[in-house]
Amino acid sequence: MAVMNAPFEQRRRTPTEAQIRLAAQCRDGTGPQDRGRSTVRASAYVCPDRFAAEQALFRRHPVVLGPSAMLPEPGTAMTHDGFGAPLLLLRDGRGALRIFLNACRHRGTRLMDAPEPVKEPVVLCPYHAWAYGLDGRLKGVPRPETFPGLDKAAMGLVEVPSVEAGGLIWALPHRPDVADFGYAEGPLGADFDALGLGDMHLYARRTHRVQSNWKLIMDAFLESYHVQRLHQNSIARFFEDGVTSGDTVGPHMRSAVARVGGLEGVDLADWSALRRIVTYAYQLFPATVLVASPDYVNLMVLMPQAVDCTLVEDFMLIPEKPMTEKAEDHWRRSWALLDGQVFGTEDFGAAEAGQKGLSSGAIAELELGSLEQGIRRFHETVEAALEAALVSAQR
């Protein structure tokens, strides 16, 4: 993979204490060491009833819709339907982002179909032309005399709880009673601000339909055991085998993997030097993966559709829009390698192969070695969240 001469410009940014700590653990081998084995039940990936129960996770916990760079310009709008609720993302003229249900307050008509951003001064219902501002307020109704006493102030679009933090767009599409974005706005947002996510350019995005359970895809980003094996013809040469560290942020997990070159003698407070050697990965519960490599970031949003089918939207974020043909060629080749081969063929292909094998009933449990215990911890988090959802539903 081509690597540009310098990683992200870090002159005005510094790593968080957590990012430094993970790097130090990679260097010194002082992080928590998993020496044992564990198992995960195969039924967790193939049982339709289990999949149906897991939908509570996507209703109760904030999900990432994409990077802020997905909708960067003021006065723009786009739609999102991947999590089962029709969403309308609106960035007003001042740049503030709000999310609403994509349904007219008159008769419930879907207002827009815009998977890519569009410039819109107002949102106009295609059925009866009710008009909404980019702040969601009802601005106009044709033939208003036919709606005597209508309170326009009470007829704005239905808002969905959301925040924009650390360069990511988080939402609760199904509007639960409690909306908690504490981790997104707190420690995770701080890490992503340190990475400069909010200032990055969205180079490319693509949605993959993966014939696999969503957790099999997450599993690939929760262990380093496969890197030198599965990716032997792509990115394996960039990484030290098994030199990793990790921790948790509430239900979320983050990890650091040392790249070839080692951390010995590196000033861990020197963000540019640190980024050349360490790749950071974040597993955002329930189903988002963010991988921060030296000169780009990949964000993968998983949207489960069935027990054996998941949509994965892959975003590639780069420091700035390519200004030369040389830069464009670099990013074109990087995107082809990462989205086309590493993720799109190798990781997603492995997940599909795993789904086929597990669906055959060949094994009752998956064996996990010491380099794979991140998978066990993730499944324990899923189990705990399902139990909490069940208790809440019984109240």
Image: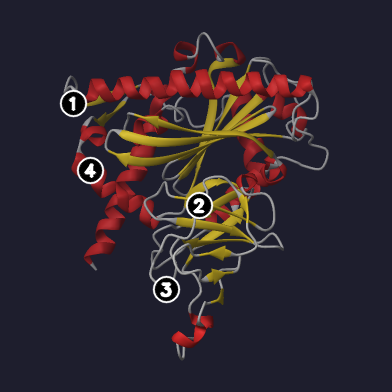
Q: Nearer the viewer, residue 254 or 236?
A: 236
Q: Which amino acid does label 2 sit on?
A: Thr
How busy is the neighbourhood of tag 2: few (under 14 within 10 Å), some, or many (20 plus)?
many
- Residue, x 36% and y 36% (percent of image)? 310
Mark 4 and mark 2 lie on one chain; the one further toward the N terminus is 4
Tell me, yes or no, whether the two marked residues, 4 and 2, touch with CB atoms within 8 Å.
Answer: no
- Dots 3, 4 in contact, CB < 8 A: no
N-terminal-most mark, 3 or 1: 3
Q: Residue at x 30, y 57 (%)?
A: 389
Separation (CA) of disc 4 from disc 2: 29 Å
The answer to whether 59 is drawn above or below residue 41 in the figure is below
Sort mark 3 into few (<14), some (14-19) or many (20+) by Cα contacts within 10 Å.
few
Where residue 135 appears, as percent x and y from the top left, is 60, 68
Q: Mark 3 points at which residue?
A: 106
Q: Residue 116 carries which label?
A: none
Mark 2 lies on residue? 79
Q: Is mark 4 on a helix, strand or loop?
A: helix
Could you give the CA–CA distance between mark 2 and mark 3, rounded to whole angstroms? 19 Å
Q: Which of 86 and 127 is in front in this view?
A: 127
- Identify the mark nearer the N-term, 2 or 1: 2
Q: Which amino acid does label 4 sit on?
A: Arg
Question: Which element type, helix, strand or loop, lies under badge 1?
Answer: loop
Q: Mark 4 points at which residue?
A: 50
Q: Residue at x 52, y 77 (%)?
A: 141
Q: Residue 364 carries which label?
A: 1
Q: Which of marks 3 and 4 is in front?
A: 3
Q: Is mark 2 on a helix, strand or loop?
A: strand
Compared across the picture, whether 47 is left or right of 282 comes to: left
